Image: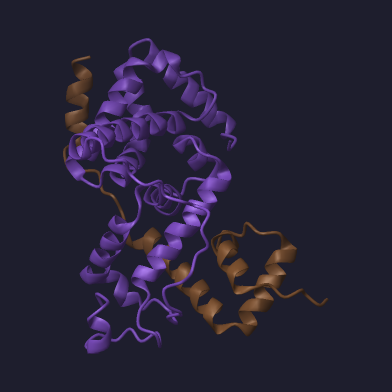
Chain colours: A brown, B purple
Amino acid sequence: MRVIEISCLEVWKEISNYLDNDVEPELRARMEGHFKACAHCTAILDGTRNVVKLVGDGMEYKVPAGFRRRLYDRIKDK
Amino acid sequence: MEALNPSLETRESELVQKAGAGCREAFYQLVQPCERVLFASAMAILNNEADAEEAAQEAVLKAFTNISRFRGECKFSTWIIQICINEARTKINKARKYLYESIDEPENGEDGDYFPRDFADWREIPSEALQRKELREALQRAMASLPENYREVLILRDIQHLSTEETALVLGIGKGNVKTRLLRARLQMRDALAPGFDGNWSLGRPEYTKVRAW
């Protein structure tokens, strides 16, 4: 099946949904066709995928030590 | 709204009932699994540990006092994250009012088209990079540079792994907005973090170390 061309701008708009598997199959096919032909968009796709991975693996917000104890102390007084 | 596993749902509503009757132990059991997400949501808005702890604790205290108002229409975690986000927003609005008095903040437009800053080729993440302190610091800086409404969504979706629906619910925005903000946040993070143009990660190449942390 021949897929209709899609512009870089449209690809960028959907790139995050694409990574989340949240695009219709027809759009996915058009985007995949575009990635095969466009090195720039492929670079953005790879970079954005890396961001999702880095943020998910490398960032955490650790609850400060003693958080629970201080919290329970306050609840006790309620 | 995600459906809860029925036995978990029953367990949660039992705990809510007990907590409503004043049982602190039951309340603690409800709150413990949410501590991390509460703190992270408050950090997303306040960007400061001490303020984030304060907001998260205030939220838990409010939830305890008002548990009778929780009707089980959503998960307990969704409800308490909503309280926490409101708490953090109130706190930051107070601080902003104090700082800027009458200066109006420009609205952050969400309709403009995105243009990548460059087309850096960034195929692989070397595994050792994740271990590096520089990378963690660069991530934190990039995260801190995001507008607050993008950071909130990025933290809830990509770090706390809330669904689009739940993120929309706790932030009080539409699902479309969640997706748009997540796109912006991810692309801005990419702009901030992508390595040199040829994807070369090696340290010690001055043209990269000047702009990148690794």
Residue ID at (25%, 43%): A63
Picture coordinates of residue B178, whole percent (x, y):
51, 47
Q: Residue B133, located in which quarter of the rendered image?
A: bottom left
Pick the front one: B113 or A62: B113
Residue located farthest toward the right when viewing the structure as drawn: A1
Instruction: Tell me if B131 is positioned left or right of B156 in this view.
Output: left
Instruction: Tell me if A42 is positioned left or right of A23 in this view.
Output: left
Total numbered badges shown on the rendered structure: 0
Pick the front one: B34 or B180: B180
Residue ID at (81%, 77%): A2
Q: Quadrant of the N terminus of chain B?
A: top right
Residue ID at (51%, 40%): B168
Picture coordinates of residue B128, whole percent (x, y):
30, 76
Residue located farthest toward the top when viewing the structure as drawn: B21
Picture coordinates of residue A50, whole percent (x, y):
43, 70
User: Residue B146, relative to residue B196: is it above or below?
Assistant: above
Picture coordinates of residue B136, whole percent (x, y):
26, 65
Pick the front one: B14 or B126: B126
Residue ID at (48%, 69%): B115
Q: Residue A68, located in which quarter of the rendered image?
A: top left
Instruction: Tell me if A26 is positioned left or right of B129 in this view.
Output: right
Q: Quadrant of the C terminus of chain B?
A: bottom left
User: Residue A40, relative to residue B161: is it above or below?
Assistant: below
User: Residue B28, relative to residue B177: is it above or below?
Assistant: above
User: Residue A76, relative to residue B111: is it above or below?
Assistant: above
